[in-house]
């Protein structure tokens, strides 16, 4: 059984790599661009107690989606690219992804009722949702990665070291996707709610979010 599973994964991986020759993603780059507004020149306050972090209040949101992230509009099962998004009309995908993160963090803010005014800073590193072809057939994985920093808005000092967060979410396909759409659970709604919860976990405890294990499709996202 293990041999059959391995063979299936390798076969699918070959097919995927064969259909993704024209779009080149930057997701494997080792040095991600940092927005000027997110330049981290201070050292985070050391060993902040959990009680302190649980007393944060989101007072400002800053989201940066680097223009260097490559957008793909190819309607393939797995197009190569850093940003793959179909949940909004064709337009500026960088701005659309930024708006999704901003909406998600605003939802997070409703459940964070501390006293320390905090700026949540997000740098998007990858936002790979499903194409039309994948959504209405096989489904897949919404592969999302970002860097998060928390900053005291009064002092400008970091409250915790910046950290990378992987926030993958199962992408519904076929009949499940159609039924979800009818219930109002579109890709955009599901991803926004998911990111809101991920950010809440990261604010409550740095590194508190554990990325879901979503099987073969998730493994292909790492290729």
Image (tube, rainbow, N blue to C red):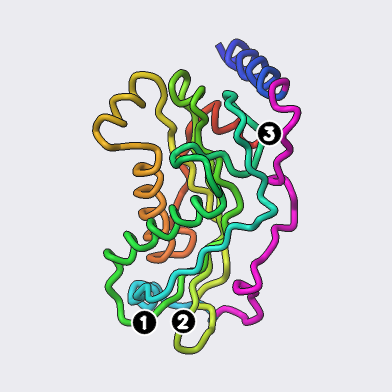
Does residue 22 belong to the magenta stretch? yes
If the image is split into quadrants, where does the N terminus sit? Answer: top right
The range drawn in magenta is 18-44
Give residue 189's mark.
none
* Rendered location of residue 217, percent (x, y): 54, 28
x then y, percent, for residue 170: 43, 34
Q: On the image, numbered disc 1 is attached to which residue?
A: 116
The majority secondary structure of the magenta stretch comes to loop
Query: Counting other residues with Cα less than 10 Å from the Cα at mark 2, is it few (<14), some (14-19), or many (20 or more)?
Result: many
SS for callout 2: strand
Q: Is residue 149 magenta?
A: no
**Secondary structure beneath disc 1?**
strand
State which tag comes first along the sequence, 2 or 3: 2
Task: Find disc 3 in the rendering and name its residue.
Answer: 223
Neighbor class of circle 1 (other Cα within 10 Å; few <14, some 14-19, many 20+) is some
- What residue is shown with label 2? 152
**Mark 1 / mark 2, whichever is N-terminal:** 1
Answer yes or no: do the residues labelled 1 and 2 have beta carbons within 8 Å? yes
């Amino acid at each position: 059984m293990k041999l059959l599973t391995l063979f299936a994964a390798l076969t699918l991986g070959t097919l995927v790599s064969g259909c993704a020759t024209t779009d080149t993603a930057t997701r494997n780059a080792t040095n991600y661009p940092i927005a000027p507004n997110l330049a981290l020149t201070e050292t985070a306050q050391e060993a902040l107690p959990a009680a302190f972090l649980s007393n944060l209040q989101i007072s400002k949101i800053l989201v940066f989606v680097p223009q260097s992230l490559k957008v793909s509009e190819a309607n393939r099962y797995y197009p190569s690219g850093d940003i793959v998004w179909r949940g909004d009309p064709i337009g500026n995908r960088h701005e659309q992804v930024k708006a999704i993160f901003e909406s998600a963090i605003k939802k997070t803010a409703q459940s964070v009722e501390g006293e320390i005014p905090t700026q949540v800073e997000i740098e998007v590193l990858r936002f790979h949702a499903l194409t039309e072809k994948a959504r209405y057939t096989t489904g897949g994985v919404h592969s999302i990665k970002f860097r998060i920093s928390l900053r005291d808005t009064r002092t400008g000092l970091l409250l915790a070291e910046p950290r990378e967060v992987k926030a993958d979410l199962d992408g519904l396909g076929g009949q499940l996707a159609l039924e979800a759409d009818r219930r109002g659970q579109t890709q955009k709604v599901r991803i926004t709610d998911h990111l809101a919860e991920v950010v809440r976990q990261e604010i409550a405890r740095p590194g508190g979010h554990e990325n879901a294990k979503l099987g073969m499709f998730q493994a292909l996202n790492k290729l």
